[in-house]
């Protein structure tokens, strides 16, 4: 997979699909990398030029010293697009990736055609929820939180019937950079886009997991209500509903991006 140096950051990315097709970019959640979208890639590549990347501090992208900010993570996306000479994109992000999408919709509306915001909210958690996680990782590494994170990401039923998916995601967490993870935790902790998202004018689709304890459906409904004209869909599953309900997720995603 290729790398690009942009915005002072070495970014790991993948670009696939038809060279003349519209571009859709996928932005990963906290603690994963762009392989979290493997179940979406085939459906998107049939119609789009697909750009996936590892967020700052994640996967094979560089891990500069933290803390990071959502503003910084959003500007990384713009730098990647500039380096690849891509003017406008459809954007789909999950959790942290969704917050990056909100930032782009507010601060770079000329770069975004349509936004898909998944398992996310304009304000996720509080310092009281984030700071103990950050301190636990700094003290004991990713294993201090990995099992608990998997329990929030996937329902018990899915973990039982698809143990290989659970094991793969646990592996991603265990090899994640503690420094990159905690720096992104700080970005999420300090971000509050609740007022700002009302300025988004791009068409928006919100997709939430019906059993997500990290960003409950009520957060998604409130987000959709705050953005003029936003659509809302709720899928079976927990936080990583793109993995638990890939067929419905892909149908909703592609249907929104291709709607006239």
Image (spheres, rainbow, N blue to C red):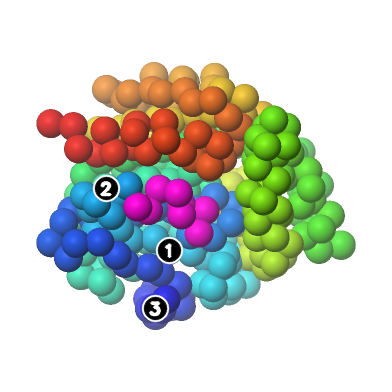
Question: Which residue was labeled with disc 1?
Answer: 53
Q: Earlier in the sequence, mark 2 or mark 1?
A: 1
Residue 211 lies left or right of residue 128; in this view the side is: left
Question: Which residue was labeled with disc 2?
Answer: 90
Q: How far apart are marks 2 and 1 (CA)?
A: 14 Å
Residue 259: image location, x then y, percent:
18, 32
Residue 20: image location, x then y, percent:
12, 61
Residue 56: image location, x then y, percent:
52, 65
Quick check: is 144 in the magenta stretch?
Answer: no
Q: From the image, which quarter does the N terminus lie in?
A: bottom left
Element marked by disc 3: loop
183 or 233, which is in the foreground?
A: 233
Q: How far apart are marks 1 and 3 (CA)?
A: 10 Å
Question: Which residue was labeled with disc 3?
Answer: 2
Say whether marks 2 and 1 touch (CB < 8 Å).
no
Q: Which of marks 1 and 3 is nearer the N terminus?
A: 3
- Which quadrant would residue 137 be assigned to in this image? bottom right
Q: What stretch is highlighted in magenta?
A: 35-42
Say whether marks 1 and 3 touch (CB < 8 Å).
no
Q: How far apart are marks 3 and 2 (CA)?
A: 21 Å
Q: How many labels does the image show?
A: 3
């Amino acid at each position: 997979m290729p790398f690009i140096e942009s915005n002072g950051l070495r970014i790991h990315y993948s670009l696939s699909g038809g060279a003349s097709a519209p571009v859709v970019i996928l932005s990963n959640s906290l603690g994963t990398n762009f392989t979290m979208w493997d179940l979406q890639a085939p459906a998107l590549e049939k119609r789009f030029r697909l750009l996936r990347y590892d967020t700052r501090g994640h996967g094979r992208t560089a891990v500069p010293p933290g803390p990071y900010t959502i503003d910084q993570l959003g500007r990384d996306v713009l730098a990647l697009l500039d380096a690849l000479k891509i003017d406008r994109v459809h954007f789909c992000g999950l959790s942290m990736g969704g917050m990056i999408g909100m930032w782009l919709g507010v601060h770079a509306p000329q770069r975004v055609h349509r936004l898909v915001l998944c398992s996310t909210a304009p304000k996720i958690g509080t310092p009281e929820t984030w700071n103990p996680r950050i301190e636990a990782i700094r003290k004991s590494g990713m294993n201090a939180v990995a099992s608990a994170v998997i329990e929030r990401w996937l329902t018990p039923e899915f973990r039982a019937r698809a143990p290989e998916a659970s094991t793969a995601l646990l592996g991603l967490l265990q090899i994640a950079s503690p420094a990159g993870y905690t720096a992104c935790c700080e970005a999420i902790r300090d971000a509050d886009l609740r007022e700002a998202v009302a300025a988004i004018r791009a068409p928006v689709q919100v997709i939430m997991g019906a059993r997500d304890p990290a960003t409950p459906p009520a957060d998604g409904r409130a987000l959709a209500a705050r953005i003029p004209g936003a659509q809302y869909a709720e899928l079976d599953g927990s936080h990583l509903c793109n993995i638990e309900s890939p067929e419905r997720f892909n149908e909703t995603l592609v249907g929104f991006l291709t709607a006239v």
